Image (tube, helix red, strand yellow):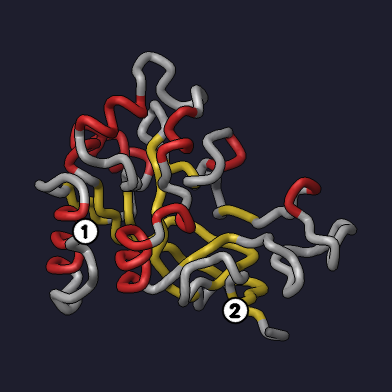
Amino acid sequence: MGTTIPANRPAIGWRAWVLGDDGRLLSVHDSSVHGRWTRPGGMAATCMPSRRTPQMPEPHTSPDKTCHCGLRAMNLEPLLYALVDQPELIGTRPDRWTDPGRWADLDELEWRTRNNVLYMPDVIGTCEMWGRFEAGRWFDPDGTYRFQYGRVGKTLHLGAHVASWAKAVKHWHRGARVHVGRSLGAAWLDEIATVERLPSHTGATP
């Protein structure tokens, strides 16, 4: 897009996260230490060799127009739509929960199925994004943008299935208002829409 956003006036977007076993917010696509959104100064996008496209095979500053890289952010309403209609594009899909790197002491796939959150993230909240930015790629939900830098914003919604982690989340993200949901599954998305004063037709009900 040829422009950058200054760090002192970041763009405000929305993201979905999962929780690590210590209450830190993790990228839906990366449960390793590299996916933690608690780094001092925020996150910096890095293009991994395995994700580079034939149009951009060499190392480069992220995000690039012809590559898949960058930190994603959306507006809230299309994010809620996508979590109901296209969760695989957000990354919350059944094969995601077979990763043993998060909660090794439980069968997360079975646990999420039982709690009706098989296609739900743990946290939905605001993020502050700056630096270079580009539009999402063809496989991203409509309204997605990719940024060079990002940090957790001022509002976090926790699903009822992870309500017991609220204290830990507040510890790691002291500047954020943490709302703990009362419902499971898509009903939780309706709760978020109500709190954030979105229209009732957000698509949060299957």
Image height check: is 70 above or below 6?
above
Q: Which residue is mark 1?
A: 189
Three-letter code for the amino acid on which mark 1 is drawn = Leu
* Quarter of the view holding residue 196: bottom left
Q: Position of residue 140 (x, y in %)?
A: 53, 66
Crowd class of label 1 (few under 14; some 14 to 19; many from 20; radius 10 Å) = many
Q: Residue furthest top?
A: 105
Q: Which residue is mark 2?
A: 5
Between circles 1 and 2, the one closer to the viewer is 1
Tell whether 183 sits left or right of 41.
left
Crowd class of label 2 (few under 14; some 14 to 19; many from 20; radius 10 Å) = some
Residue 75 image label: none
SS for dot 2: strand
Total tally of numbered discs in the picture = 2
Q: Residue at x 16, y 45 (%)?
A: 184
Tell whether 96 sits left or right of 84.
right
Q: Residue at x 47, y 75 (%)?
A: 142
* Quarter of the view holding residue 3: bottom right
SS for dot 1: helix
Taking depth in this image into account, of 180 and 53 the one nearest to the observer is 53
CA separation in Å, label 1 and label 2: 30 Å
Q: Residue furthest right?
A: 58
Q: Position of residue 99 (x, y in %)?
A: 50, 28
Q: Residue at x 52, y 41 (%)?
A: 36
Q: Going from the N terminus, do you reach mark 1 or mark 2 first?
A: 2
Q: Position of residue 173 (x, y in %)?
A: 36, 47
Q: Position of residue 53 (x, y in %)?
A: 79, 60
Q: Residue at x 22, y 45 (%)?
A: 159
Three-letter code for the amino acid on which mark 2 is drawn = Ile
